[in-house]
Image (cartoon, coloured by chain):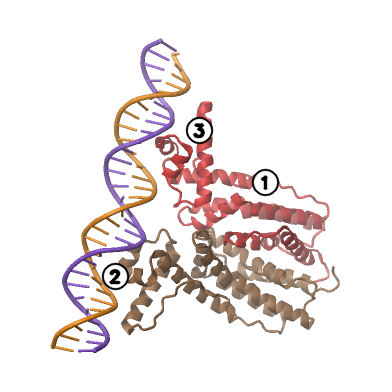
Chain colours: A red, B brown, C orange, D purple
Amino acid sequence: MATTDLPFHLASEKGLHPKGVERLRKLTASATELFLEHGYEATSMDMLIQQVGGSRRNIYERFGGKEGLFSAVIAEECVKLAEPLESLTLEDGCVRQTLEKFGAEILHIIKQPRVLELHRLMIAEGKRFPQLSRTIWSAGHHNAKSVLAAWIRRQQEQGTLRPALDPSGLAYAFIHMVTGEAQLQLLSGGRCTTKEQDNNTVTLAVSLFLAAAQETDHA
Amino acid sequence: MATTDLPFHLASEKGLHPKGVERLRKLTASATELFLEHGYEATSMDMLIQQVGGSRRNIYERFGGKEGLFSAVIAEECVKLAEPLESLTLEDGCVRQTLEKFGAEILHIIKQPRVLELHRLMIAEGKRFPQLSRTIWSAGHHNAKSVLAAWIRRQQEQGTLRPALDPSGLAYAFIHMVTGEAQLQLLSGGRCTTKEQDNNTVTLAVSLFLAAAQETDHA
DNA sequence: TAATTATGGTACGGTATATTACCATACCTT
DNA sequence: AAGGTATGGTAATATACCGTACCATAATTA
């Protein structure tokens, strides 16, 4: 199952000469940079043309305007966001270590500037590009939640975790405990959390999670 | 201590005639509506003037332009956001009930359209108005965290909760468990969570919190 | 009541932007 | 190498918007 079935027109490199491919790459790279940096409105086509060179007609014929370019570029970025999450394999070994590793990993991902700006766009341009907004959400949080929930369900079947609690609910709770504060702080312009703070956050989240999900003598 | 010391120029109603006060109220009300609905850039002064009537010079003399108006209006909205949080009193009775009530309350607050749009602005315009962004964060999440952390500390001193865990960390964990999913879903354009889902979210969060914060036989 | 002030309404200047049009040139195919 | 296509660069069009200027009128004060 593809977690991100893109409803957007991705510029295909088919039937393009090597030079053309290189130009296209350079164009999308610059466009991505600008859109992530300045947002949709504040990024002007003149800006882009001046930075990347080349002709305007190229963009308009290939992407159908600013909106098309934005959609294509952001959709491509969503694929990149989803990759490390989908390739994340949760082992069935020590549950505490596995959770700590998973927590540290998603926290690391969410703090990357590109991922952060992608989430900023998701929220800022949610009304202008609803589909795109959902795509980002699906590639990010929803994706991570699916991976973790599947692991929790597996552990419950194996008896490593008590089966009473809802895997999806647990997964969301854990993910938001880990990522919530750092993400909100960074998105609201606060300074980045330190590595020590992050460790504490993950450790605390794992503790809360395991205290409820592992104990059997507590209703 | 004022949780929101506003670094912005709030339009004073001092020395204004009743008519003038009413005009000013109408102006700020419309401006708030438009800014929250369409964001900063997409809201034009022409739009506002057309909706509210009156003269442009009023706005420019009183607020010093679009940015000033935006700052003043949003700062005022922050005060309204902070009010219900500051007046939230956490009793020292049954911890589970108190937590459930607190959780339900902040979830209710975060889901209100105005609060939601305020957070959208905080994230979308964080680069253009860093101070304003921090003000919103301070009036919202930071405020809620302070209230809850103080309560946790009190419970720890009374022996109702075990004192090993950091109150601030616990407070953040709880708040994000409760509000994270609903907020992210709504901000990314998803549909609102149901009352039943909300109840489950709060119940689960309280369970996770108490399992770790109440037990004394678990490291 | 007369004078002064504040205000409503509108028009203007300057700037910025998305999009289309056009021409000369580089590139690729045959 | 010749011809056709894609492309680079620039200009032009149309629109939108912020901020200011201006004048007539309503409101307030002396």
Which residue is labeled 1 in the image? A84
Asked if residue B101 can be seen in this view, the reply is yes
As drawn, which residue projects farthest toward the right?
B217
The subunit letter for the residue under badge 2 reads B
Asked if residue B96 can be seen in this view, the reply is no
Which residue is labeled 2 in the image? B55
Disc number at residue A168? none
Q: Are marks 2 and 3 in contact (CB under 8 Å)?
A: no
What whole-number distance in Å separates the C-alpha atoms at marks 2 and 3?
51 Å
Q: Secondary structure at mark 2?
A: loop
Which residue is labeled 3 in the image? A23
**Residue displayed at 69% across by 67% down:** B173
Mark 1 neighbour density, 10 Å: few (under 14) some (14–19) many (20 or more): some
Q: Amino acid at mark 1?
A: Pro
Can you say which quadrant of the picture contains the C terminus of chain A? Answer: bottom right
Quadrant position of residue B137: bottom right
Earlier sequence position, callout 1 versus callout 3: 3
Q: Secondary structure at mark 1?
A: helix
Compared across the picture, whether A62 is left or right of B122 comes to: left
